[in-house]
Image (tube, helix red, strand yellow):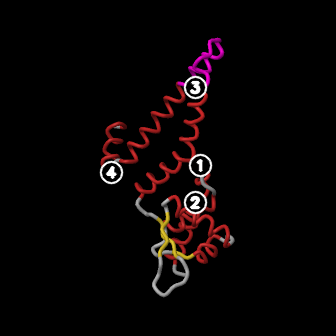
Amino acid sequence: MSAEAKQLAEAREEFVAQWGAMGSQWGINRTMAQIHALLMTSLDPISTDDVMAELQVSRGNAHTNLKELVAWGLVRVVVKKGERREYFEAEKDVWQIFTIVTRERKKREIEPALAVLNRCSEGTKELKTPEGRAFHDQVKQLEEFVGFASKVADKVGSMKHGFAIQMAAKMLG
């Protein structure tokens, strides 16, 4: 192995490991994030067998996580002519990855939280005691804030990459 190939392999291994560690912060498991990182940094589509060998995971683990990545829209199935195996490639556009992860997190985390806040707010709006009023007011404020943040995320996610960057630069500048 050449020095450059060794350097690339070490950097890729570090990236895959770190991306996997960050995955739990995004609501996905470590292996799913590692597979995503592996596919993102591959020039060519990779088979399930390649994923298993590279990450030293079982076929079931690789298969389950690849299917989930496909369901999220972060990974596509690639059919190679004359091949029976499925191959996979990741979305590589960083803005697309951001919008997909944002959409999926909203569906899995924000929407259920908003539903709970709404039920709690509606269920306590008639309370008259100081404790009941305080609870209702707090939950209502949380509901409004989370709803607002969700709408902002939707708006940002629907923007074109360049425009979103310009807007962020203006806000931060």
- Amino acid identity at mark 1: Gln
Residue beneath the point at 65% across and 12% down: 129
Q: Position of residue 119 (x, y in %)?
A: 59, 30
Contact between marks 1 and 3 (CB within 8 A): the answer is no
Q: Position of residue 92 (x, y in %)?
A: 43, 63
Q: Nearer the viewer, residue 168 or 124?
A: 124
**Residue beneath label 4, please?**
160
Q: Mark 1 Cα within 10 Å, few/some/many (few <14, many 20+)?
A: few
Of the 4 image quadrants, the one containing the N terminus is bottom right
**Residue beneath label 2, please?**
33
- Amino acid identity at mark 3: Ser
Q: Nearer the viewer, residue 166 or 121?
A: 121
- Amino acid identity at mark 4: Lys
Q: Mark 2 Cα within 10 Å, few/some/many (few <14, many 20+)?
A: many
Relative to 108, say whether 94 is above or below. below
Q: CA distance from mark 2 to mark 1?
A: 10 Å
Q: Magenta segment: does it hold 117? A: no
Q: CA distance from mark 4 to mark 1?
A: 25 Å
Tag in front: 4 or 2: 4
Q: Position of residue 15 (x, y in %)?
A: 55, 62
Q: CA distance from mark 2 to mark 3?
A: 36 Å
| Label at residue 121 | 3
Q: Secondary structure at mark 4?
A: loop
Q: Secondary structure at mark 2?
A: helix
Relative to 12, say whether 115 is above or below. above
Q: Magenta segment: does it hold 124? A: yes
Residues in magenta, as a range: 122-140
Tag in front: 3 or 4: 3
Residue at the outermost bottom position: 82
Earlier residue among tags 4 and 1: 1
Earlier residue among tags 4 and 2: 2
Q: CA distance from mark 4 to mark 2?
A: 25 Å
